[in-house]
Image (cartoon, helix red, strand yellow):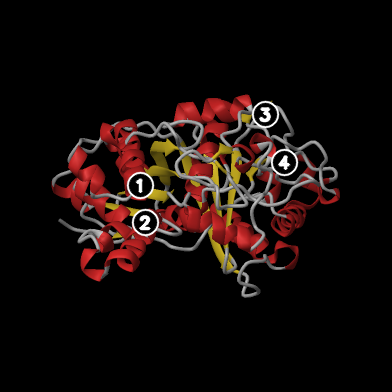
Amino acid sequence: MSWGWPERPRRVVVTGMGLVTALGNDVSATWDGLVAGRSGVDLVQSFDTSRLAVRIAAEARTFDPSSILDRKDVRRTDRYIQFALWCAHQARVQAGLPERLAGELAERTGVIIGSGLGGVHTLFDNVLTMGERGPDRISPFFVPMGISNVGAGQVAIATGALGPNFATVSACATGGHAIGEAWEAIRRGDADLMFAGGVEAAIHEATIGGFASMKALSGRNADPAAASRPFDRGRDGFVLGEGGGVLVLEALGHAQDRGATPLAELVGYGATADASHITLPAPGGAGAVRAARRALDKAGLTPAEVDHVNAHATSTYEGDRAELAAIRTIFGAHAPAVAVTANKSMLGHTLGAAGAVEAIVTIQSLRHGVVPPTINLSDPDDDAAGLDLTPARAASRALRVAVSNSFGFGGQNTALVFRRWDA
């Protein structure tokens, strides 16, 4: 088998997608919930929150790992790994790939699936076990269930993918980095096909307590559905969510040769650092601006050709302000014509999964010509004046090019540019 490298970067399309969120266990359920403007935020039910000041989150309550794992394997895999396996399974089926890859297809298929925090439940539960019962009672699965790269490894084991395999870990930019780096691997010829995305299962007493101590979370326990309020003057922090998203990215020629149906084309990816602050964005969203400009430059597109932005928009004061400033800087006079939406108003903030979840929603918007609403936007921030933030109701729009933004603690920024697939 000759690997070789292409003379020019190859075009890359999306041929499969898988989702699990607080609004449903697949792409269609999540999409329908978003378009309807339904919030997935509620009081936490998975554990006792009586010691917490913040008691709300966006839980994937109906997710059932037994649909893909037997009872023994459910016990031996952290929830974040279960999300990865389920989302990859959905994406594989939609892409029309065999249950088990073999031969050259296996060797030319890779996996990049990241998680911002990894096996949170495994890590904290075993630390408690050590403190209460001693280190000799720690589970032998503590390390392989807890580390962040095993989600990608387990997907490779499940599918037989033998190509590049690793995890990105860049806080809330994780999913965007995973998809962008998988795109680059295909473009340069290191793979023909990649499973790429992000997963997170971090709804735990310790993580909610930690974010709450930073004053990063909304405290609207009395009205959970209204708690996540991107771009709204009354926002008071983000809402923790969980879930995952995995895409099958594929070289266009490879997809055409096997008769796969492209869902969209990924045409640009930019990644930058703020080099500014461990939690706050750079003033004016400067790093976000550079990421988007780099992505558009790779795509060979101008800002005036962008129709839609799926915003990172966490519902934090400084984060939302910086992103609005970045949108104005990137698009200039074209900014009011760009339809912007904030999925976290309904899904909460899924941390390392957010970039992948929102990339899939962005693709759905391109496919259906619909921009989901930003709910709870009743009193827009002054910085939002003149921008189309799609408040309250979904909007039908003619969409050809869209940007999906993701930004993480540490000052890490990604931008993905998708183009509608017109067969």
Q: Residue at x 64, y 53 (%)?
A: 217
Q: Tell whether 31 sits left or right of 227.
A: left
Task: Name the amino acid, label 3.
Answer: Arg
Marks 2 and 1 close (CB-CB < 8 Å):
yes
Q: Residue furthest front?
A: 132
Per the image, label 3 sits on a secondary structure element best described as loop
Q: Residue at x 62, y 33 (%)?
A: 399
Task: Name the amino acid, label 4.
Answer: Val
Residue placed under numbered mark 2 in the picture: 119
Marks 3 and 4 sit apart, C-alpha to C-alpha, by: 10 Å
Circle 3 Cα neighbour tier, 10 Å, few/some/many (<14 / 14–19 / ≥20): some
Q: Earlier in the sequence, mark 2 or mark 1?
A: 1
Q: Nearer the viewer, mark 3 or mark 2?
A: 2
Depth check: 69 or 292 in front?
A: 69
Disc number for residue 397? 3
Marks 1 and 4 sit apart, C-alpha to C-alpha, by: 37 Å
Q: Quadrant of the N terminus?
A: bottom left
Q: Quadrant of residue 391?
A: top right
Marks 3 and 2 close (CB-CB < 8 Å):
no
Per the image, label 2 sits on a secondary structure element best described as loop
Residue placed under numbered mark 4 in the picture: 338
Q: Earlier in the sequence, mark 1 or mark 4?
A: 1
Residue placed under numbered mark 1 in the picture: 79
Q: Earlier in the sequence, mark 2 or mark 4?
A: 2
Q: Residue at x 25, y 63 (%)?
A: 138
Residue 373: percent from left, percent from top: 67, 32
